[in-house]
Each structure stands twice: as structure tokens, then as C-alpha cells.
Image (tube, rainbow, N blue to C red):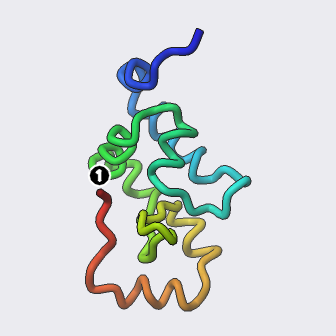
Amino acid sequence: MTIPAKTAAATLSADDLRQRIVAAINNPQFNGRRTTDGIAAEAGVPRPVVLDAIRTDMALARIVKVCPFRAEDGRPFITTKERFYKDATFREKLVDFLATERVQLG
């Protein structure tokens, strides 16, 4: 029997949710860039829970980064700061540095 995502999210501690989000971002099956939909699906929580955690959890804010570019369908990419600074191309880092308008999570 599986627990519905909304119920599972309500019973998660902030630390557990943070760990699930970071684990989903760092899944080696992906290139370190995930959409909030992909993170939510892998973490087993609704997308609004992921968005709220990224916006309000200060400990998570020190770990994750909203990339300055988007997926082909327009959704923003999320990665870890460590991975961005390690794996991003020079061009991606330059775009991030020069960005005057940060990508908004929707």
C-alpha cells in the first residue's frame, strides 16, 4: 500500500524533505539539473511542497540554486550550488554572473 503524496509530505520533517530534494537533484541518472516537477516526482511529494521548501527553507537555500537558464519547455532548472560551480560551462557561469533578472519559480 502506498501513502498518497500529500499525506507523505505532511508527515515529513524539514530535514527529511531537504534530503529528498537534494537526493533527487543529485540523482546520477540526470545531469544535475532537474525541474521542480522531476524533483517532486522523485521525492514523492507534490510540486507546491518542493517550491515552498526551495523558497522558504534557509538550509536548503544554502544548498540549491535556480539555474539562470531554462529547459526547452520553459521550466526552470534547479541544481546544487556545488554542482553548478563544478560542472557549469564558462558561458553558463558568465550568464549567471551577468543576469540582472533571476529566474522565478512558478
The residue that mark 1 highlights is: 55
Given the image, on which type of amino acid does mark 1 rest?
Answer: Arg
Query: Is 72 or 94 nearer to us in this picture?
Result: 72
Q: Quadrant of the C terminus?
A: bottom left
Judge left or right: residue 5 versus residue 32: left
Judged from the image, the secondary structure of the residue bearing numbered disc 1 is helix
Query: Is 57 or 25 nearer to us in this picture?
Result: 25
Q: Position of residue 94 (x, y in %)?
A: 47, 90
Q: Quadrant of the N terminus?
A: top right
Label tally: 1
Tell me if residue 2 comes above or below residue 75 in the rendering: above
Q: Position of residue 86 (x, y in %)?
A: 63, 74
Q: Position of residue 55 (x, y in %)?
A: 29, 52
Tell me if residue 62 comes above or below residue 11 in the rendering: below
Q: Estimate how packed mark 1 is, as few (under 14), some (14 to 19) or many (20 or more) residues with alpha carbons within 10 Å.
A: few
Judge left or right: residue 33 versus residue 27: left
Q: Position of residue 39 (x, y in %)?
A: 51, 46
The residue sitting at 45% across, 35% down in the picture is: 17
The residue sitting at 30% across, 44% down in the picture is: 52
Toward the front, the furthest residue is: 73
Tell me if residue 72 comes above or below residue 32 in the rendering: below
- Dividing the picture into quadrants, the one containing residue 103 is bottom left
Toward the right, the furthest residue is: 29
The residue sitting at 57% across, 52% down in the picture is: 25
The residue sitting at 53% across, 37% down in the picture is: 43
- Dividing the picture into quadrants, the one containing residue 64 is bottom left
Tell me if residue 35 comes above or below residue 82 in the rendering: above
